[in-house]
Image (spheres, rainbow, N blue to C red):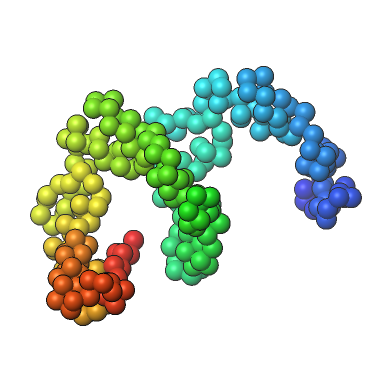
Amino acid sequence: MRVHTKEKPYNCNQCPKSFSFLSSYKRHQLSHSGEKPYQCDFCGKGFTQSGHFSVHLRNHTGEKPYECDQCDKSFSDLSSYKIHRRVHTGEKPYGCDQCGRSFSQLGNYKSHLRIHTGEKPFQCELCKRQFSISKTYKQHVRTHTGEKQYKCTDCGKGFGRLSNYMRHLRIHTGEQPFSCNQCGKCFNSSYSYSRHLRIHTGEKPYWCSQCKRLFTRSQSLNKHRCIEIDHESLCNNETQVSCSAAKPSI
């Protein structure tokens, strides 16, 4: 009945939270005491809830009981399965009030919000550079450590970023998944595909703040910048020639 009446007679004396059921109250108390009664025999990690413990065990056993009926993917936990389903349904429940962009995953939505707030919670300890997204931060750290966790089994070349690794694999497979619907030309990377589309659209997203000239490619802008510097004899004062590259909107 308390589910319908919303009665919550169990009040936590450590924080303002209250609960409808004694079992939920007792489970919550563990978050204050730090007690973790469920211990993993494989790695020693502890958990306060049996449900979280059971899901964790599947990392060791490889069990993936949640199977997608749309593709061959399977998942160890229900939440990951539900998130994956949105790939097929197109559901994007998290909408940004600032720009209208929507997301299928809460984590991606929160990361996107930092674009508007300017928040950069991830800081590199070596160079103090800050990042708004954890993934970008981790990729940056590898530039210091030299770690290349993605290895090509065909040629042995290593990559620090998954996207670069996947693009490299297409050299061996010959796959060109990005096709232009204007002329039929195919490309092995989204970057090359996006750059090609500008031939048809006439878009010139790169501009020189010194002379306001527009360019289709960043390479053309960089070449122009060198000519400008040489022409104006500003080699010793490059800050006077600041060319901005406005990234194409996604």
- Residue 185 visible at all: yes
Name which quarter of the figure residue 168 lies in.
top left
- Numbered label tally: 0
Question: Dividing the image into 4 quarters, which one contains the C terminus?
Answer: bottom left
Compared across the picture, whether 246 is left or right of 195 comes to right
x and y, in percent, of residue 30 in the image: 80, 38
Q: Residue at x 77, y 51 (%)?
A: 4
**Residue nearest the viewer, comparing 145 with 19:** 145
Q: Residue at x 52, y 22 (%)?
A: 62
Compared across the picture, whether 166 is left or right of 215 comes to right
x and y, in percent, of residue 27 in the image: 79, 38
- Residue 228 visible at all: no
Compared with residue 26, is residue 182 higher up or lower down, i.e. above or below?
below
x and y, in percent, of residue 112 in the image: 48, 59
Compared across the picture, whether 17 is left or right of 179 comes to right
**Residue nearest the viewer, comparing 79 with 155:** 155
x and y, in percent, of residue 45 in the image: 67, 28
**Residue nearest the viewer, comparing 81 with 3:** 81
Compared with residue 160, is residue 216 higher up or lower down, i.e. above or below?
below
Q: Residue at x 21, y 80 (%)?
A: 211
Q: Which residue is the extreme one toward the front?
A: 236
Q: Residue at x 33, y 30 (%)?
A: 151
Compared with residue 191, is residue 199 higher up or lower down, i.e. above or below?
below
